[in-house]
Image (cartoon, coloured by chain):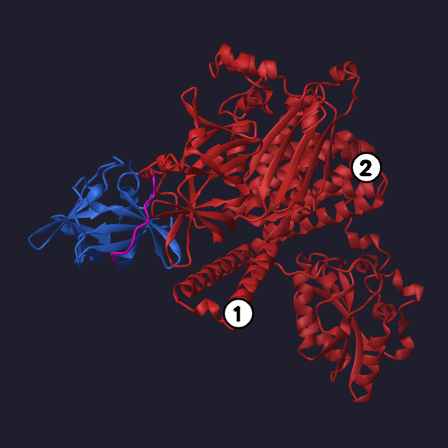
Amino acid sequence: MKEFEVTCKGKQYIIVRVSNELLALDINCIDSILMKQNITRMPGAQYFYKGVINLRGEIVPMISMRLRMGIEETEDTHKTRFVIVKTSDGSFVGLIVDEVREVIELRDEDIDKVHNAEANNYSIGIGKYGSELITLISIDRMIEGN
Amino acid sequence: MDVQQYLSIFIDETSEHLQSLNTHLLILEKEPDNAETINEIFRAAHSIKGMSATMGFNKMQKLTHDMENVFSEIRNGKMKATSDLIDVLFRGLDCLESYLANVQENQKEGDLDNQDIIDELNRIYNLALGNGESFSVAKDAAENNAVQFDDKNLFKRVPFEEHEIQAINKGKAIGLNAIGLTVFLQETCMLKAARAFMINRAIESIGDIIKLYPTAQDLEEEKYDLYFSAYIITKKKPEDMIHIIMNVSEVKEVYADYIELSDINITNDKVAAVETPKATENITTKETPSIRTTQGAKAVSSRSVRVDIEKLDVLMNYVSELIIAKNSLKSISETIPGLNSINEYVEKIEYLERLTSNIHESVTKVRMVPIDSVVSRFPRMIRDLGKKLDKEMELYMTGEDTELDRTVIDEIGDPLMHLLRNSADHGIEKTDARIKAGKPEVGSIFLDAYQIGNNVIIEVRDDGGGINVDRVKDKAIEKGVITAEQAEIMTEEEAIGILFKPSFSTSDEITDVSGRGVGLDVVKTKIESLGGVLEATTERGKGSKFLIRLPLTLAIVQTLMIKMDDEKYAIPLGSIQTVEDIPWDDIKIVDGKDVINLRDRVIPILYLSRLLDIPMKEENKEETALVVIIKKGDKQAGLVIDELVGQQEIVIKSFGKHIKPHKIVSGATILGNGDIALIVDANGLV
């Protein structure tokens, strides 16, 4: 499984907000950011998968980040975005987030790595950006889990 | 020389040659005196030796070299192809195959030891030739031919065609020279095809080639010894030609001279035709039409191109998109009032529809590969199994030219192998048991492939003992799969079904071949993942039959679109028997399960809305339930649905492996308006 490489300095991340938590996603994993659109329900799928969408003729499964993080779902707002990410096996998965904030650069020394092999734990580090603390996310771990 | 760029060619060609060796060795075992076969074997072995030496795979080279020695002696009639010898040779082939697999994986041949095979080969070899004889028998193909390496006039004895003579005359008429030449390559030259190509390119830079002998195609396929002749119309002189060709490396000698028409033989002149016997197998060339020759007039070479499978996948994707686009055009036209009453518009849409389905059909055909590429290794496997299990058996195959989608071909090999091993191990009885049962001593296993409609059927049959249903039941009770009471009322069919349950084997002794209990269930899962069905029938004492039914193509299917609540689902037509209106009162509860009695068959009823977590529609007792009857083999089930939409051709799209929905959702498709409909896999329901 490909992990984030936090060795080279000054990597770029996209900051998204879910409820009141900030998450950092490696910019190299991002395919696109979409306005919200219709999701087709997938009966019997894992609880945090909301269903699938049609992305340029491909079927892409969508994860509700709120459900994934164990936070109650709320009504979508005009800030709700679908962040389409590429996983290490080359497939696409969409993440439903409350807001896409900005692109930032984090250096090695700004990051406290978290060593946690538990599959359900998708956090791989804590980044310090100004006064804010940001959770670095392993996309591959996040899409798994039950 | 950087050989890396040749690696994929090496892998492709070596595996082809190995396959050819396998096939021909089998023939040789049955017909030890078949000269054609031994020549073919020799040629294949020689090519492998040459190529592996060039690529620096020394172990492969050494082993093929020693095998070639043996082949050479068989060809010269000094050795007999005994069963022992063939065994050793097969072991050699296996060894070569594993080297090749290593090469494929990490570009190295690996360090598998082959000394025992080489020793064995040499032992048989020395035995056959008398112990004292020395070991220097490796003869190159060239030396066995009567051609002298200093034959300066070789090119003058080659037969010419009428049109080639005309070409020479034309050239002479406008003051050009007609030059004939023969190139001799060094004996160490390995990639002869590449060398010939380079030489021809050098010649073409200063003149027009009007004829090659052997033909360009034979040169390309290395079907020539170390020399070939070329005829050129050029402004230059023979000395210039010699000079430019000698600049190409690995050329030993070049002889060139003006050709006079009086020197030339016409095709039917017999003297010349014997000169290069290997050149007469193929006829057409792909150079300019002027060098087309027709000598021999044997099999027309196949006019085909090799295309990377990925390119075909891309093409297939575009076709899929095209069908989606066509569907969306159709669905838009339904939303605009009046558009469908314009005749011309409707006609054009229908035309477009015909075109897209024709394109789809053509591309599907292009992707089809004969199953021959998979099954051709089975005769060898059965032969080996027979020896190992000490049973006599023979494999009969028909329909090797039946074609299947490339993706299916890649996957079908293992399941078929499993079934064949199963037949060999469990099916065919030992020889004495066969004699006792009054059957022919040699057991027969059949592999038949054929196409019916949109399905391809592959049957694996044997004339062995059949499946002992009682023993299956006993074993199942013993393993706690079923209870004794269940076994009592179980039909034969259901009992056979147990065989396909995970980790179930009836064989009392676990052999190398099968019986470890991983097998039939894996086969079944694989076949089903390919969209196919596996059925088994058996007759005690007469044998058993496994039948695989596969769809021709996987990507695009005809479906019945249905609506549940306001979600759309697609059910593949292939699995639908009928659609029925059933009064709600006719649905009875038997044994806690909903069933209906349809035309004297009791069919279980399933509610799709429950399976898909959709709120049930209010049951209106006066109305009828809409039931889709699903079939899988002989089994049926009724699926209660809300609403029918109609028949539609859809493109199956994968939703990846991360999201894991209910097992009856097997895929998804994109509808004309961009919405997604899920595909309900009826196989999982019955």
Q: Quadrant of residue B220?
A: bottom right
Q: Does the magenta stretch include residue A122?
A: no
Chain coloured blue here: A
Of all chains in the rendering, the one displayed in red is B
| Residue lying at 66% horizontally and 40% vertically, measured from the top left | B375
Q: Residue B339: horizontal and vertical position, in percent? A: 44, 69
Query: Quarter holding the N terminus of chain B?
Result: bottom right
Q: Does the magenta stretch include residue A36?
A: yes
Local crowd size for mark 2, using a 10 Å CA cut-off: few (<14), some (14–19), many (≥20): few
As drawn, the label of residue B10 is none
Sequence order check, earlier mark of 1 and 2: 2
Which residue is at the front of the view, B137 or A41?
Answer: A41
In this view, which residue lies farthest toward the front? B622
* Count of picture labels: 2
Q: In this view, does B658 lie above or below B320?
A: above
When the figure is inspected, residue B28 is found, relative to residue A62, above or below; the finding is above
Q: Disc 2 residue type?
A: Glu
Whole-Å distance between the Cαs marked 1 and 2? 81 Å
Q: In this view, does A70 lie above or below B216?
A: above
Q: Tell me what residue is drawn at x 76 percent, y 59 percent.
A: B224
Q: What element carries label 2?
A: loop
Which segment did they paint magenta?
A: A35-45
What's the residue type where badge 1 is placed? Answer: Lys
Horizontal and vertical percent position of residue B575: 53, 40
Residue receiving disc 2: B133
> In this view of the protein, can residue B519 be seen by the observer?
no
In the picture provided, is B61 more to the left or to the right than B649?
right
Residue B371 x %, y %: 65, 45
Helix, strand, or loop for circle 1?
A: helix
- Subunit of label 2: B
Query: Which disc, if any, is residue B348?
Result: 1
